[in-house]
Image: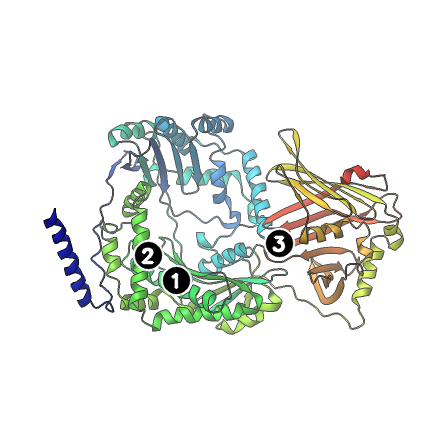
Amino acid sequence: MKKVTLSIFALALCGGVYAQKLDRSIKPKPGPAPEIKLGKTESFVLANGLKVFVVENHKLPVISASIQFDIKPALEGDMAGYRDMISELLVSGTTTRTKDKLNAEIDNMGARINVSSEGISAGCLKKYTEKVLDLMSDIAMNAQITQTELDAEKKKAISGLETQKNDPDAMVNNVSAVVNFGTNHPYGEVSSEESVQKITLEACNNYYHTYFRPNVGYMAIVGDVTLAEIKPLIERYFAKWEKKDVPVANYSIPALTTTKLTKVAFAPRVAAVQSVVSVTYPVDLKPGTSDVIKARVANTILGGGSQGRLFLDLREKHAWTYGAYSSLSEDILGGNFSATVKCRNKVSDSAVSAILDEMRAMQTEKVGDSTLQNSITYLSGGFAIGLEDPKRVAQYAINIERYNMPKDFYQNYLKNLSAVTADDVMDISKKYIRPDNANIVVAGSKEEVADKLAKYSADGKVDYYDNVGKPMVPTETKAVGANVKASDIYSKYIAAIGGEKAIAALKDIKTTSKSEMQGMQLTIIEEKKAPNMYMQKVDANMSGKSATLQKQVFDGKSGYTEGGGQKAAMAGDDLDEVMESADIAFEMHSDKYGIKRTIKGIEKVNGSDAYVMEAVNGKGKKSVEYYDVASSLLVKKISGEGEKQSITEFSDYKEVPGTGGYKVAYKVKQSQAGQVFPLNVETVEVNKGVSDADFK
């Protein structure tokens, strides 16, 4: 025992002596990249051309199955948007199963089956493997698209497009797609309400019958199975799937074949307080090529995370944004670079300048050893973690086959990643990071931001686009005459809705409206009682039963909101807002709330001239009001900022019977937080004796 103790002491002493000689100022060199051992993938090909890849993983009694189609589809043209509908249309029933039967069979297994325009995927417990393969094959071969289902999907699509009209992220994505790829490329086709309306059943069926073919399919089976188990099932359910020649469309990306200088593409956003900025352009970077790994390292250094140069500059140094990032993606049809940031109007042009400067620095300033190694380590970790997912391993096998990649691309991934040098990063940046050949796409305030960006455009101009990427002439704010006063415009509005006498005669008012949200029929009941009591209730009709989704009540002093089984007292901004809403004669009480109005000019609203007035209340909260020049009626109001911004449009004003001329808008459309709620007023009851009990 004593001998062992002495030996340990001696080793410790030697270690201490060695430590004294160690120069800790010298950073140790990274060790050799570990050898990658990908999980075993077995494969076979059916007679109809379907390529099947099997990866065993017996940790859990589950399987996942997917089919990917290698297609280059024809352009959608004036029916842009029908490929997006495929995900729902192909699970709406088959020639052997109704939609209800198909859904019931999936639900009874606790399985999932998803469809897209480029494939089918499923997941289930092992014991349901055969049944799920049966359903997948039925969808792949026998899907039945009906006009009824198509009409329903078109209605949903149009509703979704409505919510995106003032969504800055959607605006930037759509404009970027168009200016990067052009409308003669599938990535440059953007759906609109007009294109969705034109979609035909024939176009959807033609796509399905043309491109859902086994000879362009790659099937992955991952999970608690063996090749011996799964192969007979694949043959049983997919061998009868008929192969067919699949057409291959050819596209071009003009920006990749011509010298294109930087341009500014601006999407005006109503009452925006911040901008969404993207410096973007297409790149010719194909999967599996020798540039891919080097490009990933370069992008990680530029904007791949919180240690990227963009993040450290725009957020940490200048505090202009919560985050700034970039992406550089490879794609067989056309890759893409994008550097994005969200920032205040005031610093939008500065943010663009900083992004371009950091892009140029990638071409001229060699990256330091520490930064390079950190980026390589980060990417290595992500790759290693991905290998823990057997579905990733199956995808790698498919990628190699589908894109004709080197057989050892993933086997040597870490070795090639660790070999990337600072010179490689600079060379690849000169090839793929192009600040002088970019599209600067911005969604934001035209008045506060657009003109400041013109200096970044090669031709000194700003090109304007609408929310779906179509070129447009922006609405101009025209000046008003010096003799036009805000007080006069507002007085005419009061007269237009009935006048002070009619408003003063209001004792109580009950309005019942109808709307729709995600397929649910909504009934909105709003009650006001003089001087300042308020109640609003939103009821939903689901499966023939009515349920209250939300309720607001204010008794003149305090109030509460109720919904989802929760009840909360109103406070702060919510209480301030409901006090204004509760004032039955609010229009006549601007002084009471300290509201000051200033004329900003004249703009078009739905094709008609409207006075634009900024209203600021006594607590400094701003809103923008639009009054129709011809009728003097309020036609639009924008209130709140950022995610809380609300845009409300008013139309179809009618006189309420028995009120001496008092008018209300019978159609109201409100947009907020990416949702659009069109309200159709059905009844308005005035001075009918609303009970005080409704405000308890």
Residue 253 found in image quarter: bottom left
Q: Say which amino acid is labelled 3.
A: Lys
Q: Say which amino acid is labelled 2.
A: Tyr
Q: Which residue is mark 1?
A: 307
Q: Say which amino acid is labelled 1.
A: Gln
Q: What is the CA distance from the residue labelled 3 to the residue labelled 2?
A: 36 Å
Q: Is residue 614 left or right of residue 500?
A: left
Please say if the residues under marks 2 and 1 sit with CB atoms less than 8 Å apart.
yes
Vertical placement of residue 118 versus 573, above or below: above
Q: Which residue is mark 2?
A: 378
Nearest the viewer among 39 and 68 is: 39
Precedes in sequence: disc 3 or disc 2: 2
Give SS at disc 2: helix
Q: Position of residue 213 (x, y in %)?
A: 37, 38
Precedes in sequence: disc 1 or disc 3: 1
Query: Image point 37% across, 47% down: which residue?
Result: 248
Vertical placement of residue 54 versus 532, above or below: above
Residue 606 visible to an observer of this rendering:
no
Q: What is the CA distance from the residue labelled 2 to the residue labelled 1?
A: 10 Å
Q: Residue furthest left?
A: 3
Q: Position of residue 299 (x, y in %)?
A: 36, 61
Name the disc covering residue 644, or none.
Answer: 3
Precedes in sequence: disc 2 or disc 1: 1
Q: Nearer the viewer, mark 1 or mark 3?
A: 1
